[in-house]
């Protein structure tokens, strides 16, 4: 039996691009519960059945690096212009040897919110940008 994985080593990719982020959140899969009771059902309880799947938005955060950040702005601009904008995004958890351990594949993703850093003249924190993406499903694979 192995040890639990740490959240330290991961990578995010779309298409042929891999990018570094400091945080990924929202890798959530959920199923609605449908309650049903047939007319001939003799018990005084309802049956519970799995319903539609639901997926929340995924949020990616990273420190701003001007040369690398233009791609996110271009992607967001494509959405606003009505162009082809849906992408497959992958989030891959790696072990200490940088080998892939688990991958979340996010289908038909597109940016719905791009947030710049909070700026203050007395601050010394890293400037962090945040990208929120909507999507149409997550699958998980383990090599």
Image (tube, rainbow, N blue to C red):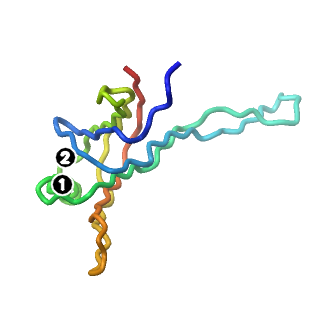
Estimate how packed mark 2 is, as few (under 14), some (14 to 19) or many (20 or more) residues with alpha carbons within 10 Å.
Answer: few
Asked if the residue under mark 2 is in contact with the one under mark 1, i.e. CB atoms within 8 Å, the reply is yes
Q: Is residue 122 above or below residue 78?
A: below
Residue at image point 44% right, 48% down: 26
Task: Using the image, determine if residue 75 lies above or below residue 46.
Answer: below
Front position in the image: 3 or 70: 3
Q: What number is the disc on residue 57?
A: none
Front residue (pair 6, 140): 6
The residue that disc 1 covers is: 78
Which image quadrant is residue 90 in? top left
| Identity of the residue drawn at 39% across and 28% down | 102
Of mark 1 and mark 2, the one earlier in the sequence is: 1
Label 1: how many Cα within 10 Å (few below 14, some 14–19, many 20+): some
Image point 50% across, 39% down: which residue? Answer: 29
Q: Which mark is residue 84?
A: 2
The front one of 35 and 101 is 101
Residue 48 in picture, x, y percent from top left: 71, 34
């Amino acid at each position: 039996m192995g040890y639990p994985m740490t959240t330290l080593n991961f990578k995010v990719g779309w298409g042929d691009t891999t990018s570094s982020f400091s945080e990924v959140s929202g890798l959530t899969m959920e199923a609605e519960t449908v309650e049903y009771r047939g007319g001939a059902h003799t018990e005084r309880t309802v049956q519970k059945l799995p319903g539609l799947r639901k997926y929340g938005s995924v949020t990616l955060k990273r420190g701003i690096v001007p040369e690398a950040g233009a791609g996110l702005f271009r992607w967001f601009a494509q959405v606003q212009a009505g162009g082809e904008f849906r992408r497959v995004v992958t989030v891959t958890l790696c072990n200490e040897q940088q080998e892939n351990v688990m991958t979340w594949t996010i289908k038909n993703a597109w940016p719905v919110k791009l947030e710049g850093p909070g700026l203050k003249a007395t601050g010394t924190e890293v400037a962090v940008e945040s990208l929120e993406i909507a999507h149409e499903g997550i699958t998980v694979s383990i090599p």
